[in-house]
């Protein structure tokens, strides 16, 4: 007869045996030969149920750390992507509350610098201008690599103009200063020699003449 | 007169923002993204979900200072329109939509709208729409 108490530590099967004894016997790698267990449907059913439960528990135990790791990884990715937005900077509107994430503005300004021949932008940071009459002033700090085939002041002036142009005409930022730091020298930009009269057309990489 | 709900107000702001030419999408706030990430282990309804949508946050300040609506949007640069221009249009459309929604419910609370651009897409040269 089964024990009715829900908190009973053990259960008596309909065949009269205790569940714990039957399960211990089933777990024994070298069980003693027991004709009852081999033929009793109650013992068989109990062992099959507990075996299924054990398999499910083992499977869950294996999955849980993976799931938690995946959850933690996902949460950290979200937090990192939020941090990557950077500061929120004012767009150049004196009345409305309009802002832009530093990362979004920096991407446009880096592209503007990259478009200057002989320049490759590295980092671009933006911050509210400290000494600006306008409340919406923004200061830009740009680091870049530049080739040395032209005087650096000339090249950085060109970068500065390109950055201010992009900030004002593409974004709508009121830039008060662009500080540029050259951190690396690049090889001079390659300019192909003009073809001499009567020369053959340039060849493709596989050696055939290029057309069109 | 129907009861005024924050979720409906957020939906009105969301639609107005997405209807703005040049706005390509809304960027969910951190709280919303975290809520979605952990939702399999949380009860299906938690208070935060009622207060944020994908990229729109609405708060009603006590004391009569009205509604504060914050929208985070992604913008594509179009011919003749700076990011600033698109943000201005989005701001005005959101403010109008929220005020109209409040008026439908008999409310005349002040509305403050903040538009934050979180991503800019610049089409390749010569392909500006």
Image: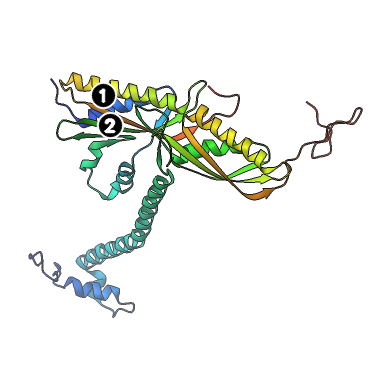
Circle 1 SS class: helix
Q: Position of residue A136 (x, y in %)?
A: 40, 34
Q: Is residue B95 above or below residue A69?
A: above
Between discs 2 and 1, the one toward the N terminus:
2
Of A31 and A85, which appears nearest the observer? Answer: A85
Position of residue A108 in the picture relative to residue A17 (left or right): right
Specify the subunit that label 1 lies on: B
**Of A115 and B42, which appears nearest the observer?**
A115
Res. B19 in view: no
Q: Quadrant of the N terminus of chain B?
A: top left
Q: Are marks 2 and 1 on the same chain?
A: yes
Asked if residue B123 is positioned above or below residue A206 in the image, the reply reads: above
Per the rendering, the mark at residue B69 is: 2
Residue drawn at x 33%, y 79% as measured from the top left: A30
For residue A22, which quarter of the picture? bottom left
Which percent across, then down, holds residue A196? 89, 30
Q: Residues within 10 Å of mark 2 (few under 14, many from 20)?
A: many
**Would you say residue B100 is visible in this rendering?**
yes
Q: Quadrant of residue B62?
A: top left
Residue picked out by circle 1: B98
Q: Give the spatial CA distance, label 2 vs label 1.
A: 9 Å
Residue shown at 14% from the left, 34% from the top: B63
Labels 2 & 1 near each other (Cβ < 8 A): yes
């Amino acid at each position: 007869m089964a024990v009715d108490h829900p908190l009973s530590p053990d259960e008596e099967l309909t065949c009269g045996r205790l569940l714990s004894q039957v399960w211990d016997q089933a777990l024994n790698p070298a069980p003693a030969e027991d004709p009852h267990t081999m033929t009793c449907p109650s013992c068989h059913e109990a062992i099959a149920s507990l075996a299924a439960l054990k398999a499910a528990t083992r499977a869950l135990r294996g999955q849980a750390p993976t799931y938690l790791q995946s959850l933690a990884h996902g949460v950290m990715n979200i937090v990192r992507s939020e941090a990557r937005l950077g500061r929120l900077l004012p767009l150049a509107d004196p009345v409305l509350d309009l802002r832009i994430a530093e990362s979004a503005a920096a991407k446009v300004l880096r592209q503007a610098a990259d478009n200057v021949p002989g320049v490759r932008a590295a980092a671009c940071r933006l911050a509210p201008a400290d000494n600006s009459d306008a409340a919406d002033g923004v200061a830009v700090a740009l680091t870049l690599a530049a080739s040395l085939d032209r005087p650096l002041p000339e090249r950085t002036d060109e970068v500065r103009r390109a950055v201010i142009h992009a900030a004002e005409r593409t974004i709508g930022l009121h830039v008060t200063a662009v500080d540029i730091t050259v951190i690396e020298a690049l090889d001079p930009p390659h300019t192909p020699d003009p073809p001499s009269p009567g020369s053959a057309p340039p060849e493709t990489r596989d050696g055939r003449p290029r057309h069109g | 007169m129907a009861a005024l709900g924050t979720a409906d107000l957020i939906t009105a702001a969301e639609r107005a923002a997405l209807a703005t030419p040049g706005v390509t999408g809304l960027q969910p706030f951190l709280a919303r993204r975290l809520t979605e990430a952990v939702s399999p282990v949380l009860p299906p309804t938690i208070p935060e979900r009622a207060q944020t949508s994908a990229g729109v946050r609405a708060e009603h300040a006590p004391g009569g200072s009205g509604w504060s609506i914050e929208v985070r949007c992604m913008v594509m640069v179009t011919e003749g329109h700076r990011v600033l221009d698109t943000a201005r249009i989005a701001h005005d459309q959101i403010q109008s939509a929220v005020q109209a929604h409040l008026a439908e419910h008999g409310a005349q609370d002040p509305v403050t709208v903040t538009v934050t651009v979180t991503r800019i897409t610049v089409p390749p040269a010569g392909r500006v729409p």
